[in-house]
Each structure stands twice: as structure tokens, then as C-alpha cells.
Amino acid sequence: MKKVYFNKEINAHFSVQSPESYLEDKASTELHKWYSIFIVDELTGTIGVDDAYFSCNSPAILFVTPGQILSFEEVTSWKGFVVSFNSEFYCIEYHDSEISCK
């Protein structure tokens, strides 16, 4: 499952996708390009963010920002969702100048 919003005028991107779809789109280790929220209901395997590695034995939420190194090691089962957006999406709402978008 993958739902994508993209506004060409301001280059704003927002997506919600299943873990399977996310893993198909990504390399096994990469420099993360988006703000992402990983909503993990169940995970068999390990998620690495920079030099920290996480195995989730219970529901968890993981926040990742652009520039962090993200890796997935021996992930064989993952239930949840991934919400991703870029800085242009983050800044299209109100108070752009207050959050340093302009």
C-alpha cells in the first residue's frame, strides 16, 4: 500500500505506505532524504539509525530526519506504517517564517 501526495508547484511531498512498499523503494542502507515517522506494530529484525540499532518487541514509534543513515538488518516481518514528508510539505501550512521556512 502506498498513497502519495505531491505538489509540483512547491515540490511538496507526503506519503503513507506499508513497510513492504517502503522497503521495496529503499536501498538496504541509505542516507535518509525525508522526515519519516515509522509506526511499528510488530518487527522481526533490526532498524539502524546512524549508530543506534533498534529491535522492537512491542509497538513503537521511530522518528527519522533527513541526513540520518537508515538501515534494515534481517527484517523478515514488519507490521505498521511509514509516514514520510519533505521540508517543503512541512512548511506549506501556517507560520512558515516562525519555523525558518522563509
Image (cartoon, grey):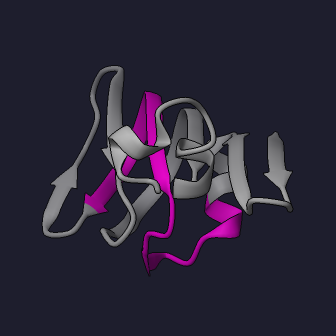
Residue 37, image x, y percentages:
45, 39
Q: Quadrant of residue 19?
A: top right
- The residue lying at 74 percent from left, 63 percent from top is 11
**Is residue 78 magenta-colored?**
no
Nearer-the-camera pick, 15 or 82:
15
Q: Residue at x 45, y 54 (%)?
A: 101
Residue in the foreground of this view, choosing between 77 and 63: 63
Magenta extent: 23-48
- Quadrant where the N terminus lies? top right
Q: Is residue 32 magenta?
A: yes
Q: Residue at x 13, y 69 (%)?
A: 51
The structure residue drawn at horizontal position 26% and vertical position 61%, both measured from the top left corner, is 49
Query: For the image shown, how many numbered marks are present on the structure?
Result: 0
State the image quarter where residue 94 is shown.
Answer: top right
Query: Which is nearer the eye, 10 or 47?
Result: 10
Q: In this view, does 47 lie above or below 2?
A: below
Q: In this view, does 6 lie above or below 18?
A: below
Image spot of residue 29 (x, y percent): 42, 78
Q: Is the magenta stretch mostly helix, strand or loop?
A: strand
Answer with the quarter of the image where residue 3 lies: top right
User: Which percent across, then down, holds residue 7?
Assistant: 83, 53
Left or right: where does residue 51 sit relative to residue 93?
left
